[in-house]
């Protein structure tokens, strides 16, 4: 509020300087306007710096809270209010969540055998999907009403739009009738980001790493199910 007031006052003095006929008074008003503008810029930069420090501290505290959960692998989602954790010692996937910065961590734990499908989703379009039976289909595609073949048939105009991305996430179908899909968002921006941008590249690489981890888990437990079935 202070910054806005300074910018407003600076504008007023610039207007007065323009209206003054006496050169001395005009210069005084002009210098006052410039001084107020500089104070406003300084106030804005200071407030922004303090805000960024506060956000960084809250993100660090949130990440530390997630890391207290037993795990062998973990990643924190882009908002620092959600996290995915794997514990290969107990064969457990944990989706941890905080409603806000001050809230307690809540957990949803899933045994590896209860993971049915994983997909990389980019702006509501599924790029890669791995299911329990290895087919390109399943709960996620039906739920989101998205088909990979539709993406391949897009025209050149649509392809040009695809050079930018607003949201990149990993979706996982689990054995939970009340809430069968969990989502970890790796990138979400109000303005689309170019696929050549470092932010997108880093987010995609991390998302793909976790896609591969979950795919290995699905494949491993699929083979175990086949072995059990053969013995029966």
Image (spheres, grey):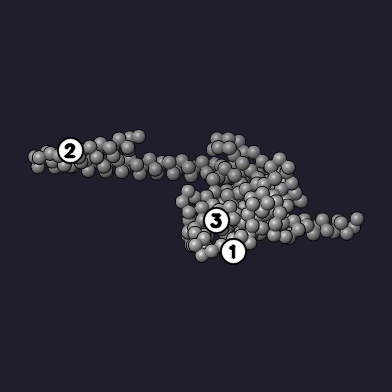
For marks 3 and 2 on the same chain, the one whose residue lies earlier in the sequence: 2
Residue 97 appears anywhere in the view: yes
From the image, tell me which residue sits under label 2: 16
Quarter residue 108 falls in = top right
Residue at coordinates 13% horizontally, 41% vertically from top-left? 26
Contact between marks 1 and 3 (CB within 8 A): the answer is: no
Neighbourhood count class around disc 1 (C-alpha, 10 Å): few under 14, some 14–19, many 20 upward? few
Label 2: element kind: helix
Task: Describe the element under mark 3 as helix, strand or loop.
Answer: helix
Q: Residue furthest right?
A: 232
Instruction: Out of 156 and 69, give the one closest to the viewer.
Output: 156
Q: Residue at x 58, y 52 (%)?
A: 124
Residue position marked by numbered label 1 in the rendering: 153
Q: Position of residue 231 (x, y in %)?
A: 90, 58
Q: Horizontal and vertical percent for residue 115?
A: 72, 51
Upstream in the sequence, badge 1 or badge 3? 1
Percent position (x, y) of residue 157? 49, 62
- Label 2 or label 1, whichever lies nearer to me, is 1
Q: Residues within 10 Å of mark 2 (few under 14, many from 20)?
A: some
Element marked by disc 1: loop
Q: Quadrant of the N terminus?
A: top left
Q: Residue at x 54, y 56 (%)?
A: 203
List the residue tagged with mark 3: 203
């Amino acid at each position: 509020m202070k910054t806005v007031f300074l910018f407003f006052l600076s504008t007023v003095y610039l207007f007065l300087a323009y209206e003054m006929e006496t050169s001395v008074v005009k210069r005084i008003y002009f210098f006052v306007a410039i001084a107020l503008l500089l104070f406003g810029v300084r106030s804005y930069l200071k407030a922004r710096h303090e805000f960024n420090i506060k956000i960084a501290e809250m993100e660090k505290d949130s990440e530390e809270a997630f890391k207290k959960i037993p795990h062998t692998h973990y990643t924190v989602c882009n908002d620092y209010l959600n996290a995915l954790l794997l514990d290969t010692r107990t064969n457990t996937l944990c989706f941890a969540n905080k409603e806000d910065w001050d809230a307690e961590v809540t957990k949803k734990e899933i045994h590896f055998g209860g993971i049915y499908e994983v997909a990389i989703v980019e702006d509501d379009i599924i790029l890669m999907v791995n299911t329990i039976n290895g087919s390109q289909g399943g709960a996620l595609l039906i739920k989101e009403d998205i088909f990979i073949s539709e993406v391949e048939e897009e025209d050149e105009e649509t392809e040009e739009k695809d050079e930018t991305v607003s949201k990149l996430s990993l979706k996982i179908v689990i054995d939970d009738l009340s809430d069968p899909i969990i989502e970890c968002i790796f990138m979400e921006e109000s303005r689309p980001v170019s696929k050549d941008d470092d932010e997108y590249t880093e987010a995609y690489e991390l998302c793909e790493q976790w896609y591969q981890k979950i795919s290995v888990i699905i494949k491993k437990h699929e083979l175990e199910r086949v072995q059990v079935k053969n013995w029966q």
